[in-house]
Amino acid sequence: MSLVLQPLASGSLGNATLIRGKQGSLLIDAGLSKKRLVERLQQVGHRAENIQAVLLTHWHKDHTRGAGLLCRRLGIPLYATPACMPAQKPELLKHPHTFSPGESFEIAEFQIETHLLPHDAPETVAFFIEAHDIRIGIVTDLGHSLDPDLHAKLQDLDGLLLEFNHDEEMLNKGPYPPFLKERILSNQGHLSNTQAGSLLERSLTPRHRVLFAAHLSKTNNHPSLARKQIQQSCEKAARSDLEVRLCTQDQPAKAFWF
Ligand SMILES: [Zn+2]
Ligand SMILES: [Zn+2]
């Protein structure tokens, strides 16, 4: 084992993903309360004290809810962009680190690349994390899938966690108010199953070993619809053998060990 990808929670009520290396671990987003985060970590046999850094994709609450408290209480370094950091009360943190979208840096055994995403929070990023020749992409909260640089980065991965937020028909016919529907459907919103499927189909290579479908809306999507889309995209990319796992809000997904 050289790397473990372990989603702890995913969806509009809170997102967090644990990446375990040989010596330590990173937490990507901390969108549950500190108490819930610690519980989820315990559930997967990991101690919060062993997290070497928390990295935030953007300031929306479903990605940051427990970050400040977790990092303050346990002295964990927190990494965020200048747009995201102020709300985390950096003056109370022992180790606040800011980075710009597009910047690369290292934390212990992990090499981290960041990539700017089109979303309605400034400086939203994707993370590409590499250690021991395994490379993982964490790509959620983006309004469109047409960025050629992002596409190129997705092709060169062993594992990908990608947003499959909504089914367009369910969203259009669903209970959300018009302004919210417009927001989600916009180029600064979230990826639909169709958009994510198209990006997946164009990105899959023989290198990919696992896909985690993430940030599924409970109201505007259904796991079976996301799965169907993924199956079609994998077939078109001649990768029907790809391991596919769906992330959920209520419990950790099954970890993938590289
Ligand atoms: Zn989100
Ligand atoms: Zn967001």
Image (cartoon, grey):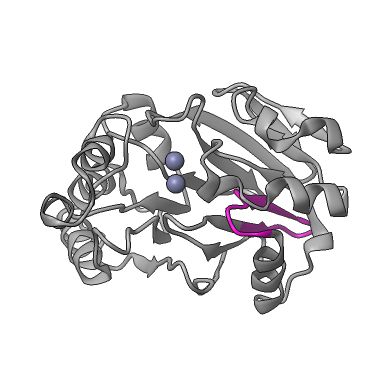
* Left or right of 142, for residue 238: left
Ligand 2 quadrant? top left
Q: Which residues make up the magenta segment?
A: 18-33
* Point 32% across, 58% down: residue: 217
Residue 50 falls inside the magenta stretch: no
Percent x, y of residue 144: 27, 34
Whether residue 180 is visible, yes or no, is yes
How many marks on residues?
A: 0
In the depicted view, which residue is nearer to us: 26 or 74?
74
In the depicted view, which residue is nearer to us: 123 or 170?
170
For the C terminus, which image quadrant?
bottom right
Image: 41 above or below 69: below
State which quadrant residue 129 falls in: top right
Percent x, y of residue 61: 54, 45
Percent x, y of residue 214: 40, 57
Residue 30 falls inside the magenta stretch: yes
* Point 43% across, 60% down: residue: 209
For the N terminus, which image quadrant?
bottom right
* Point 31% across, 42% down: residue: 190
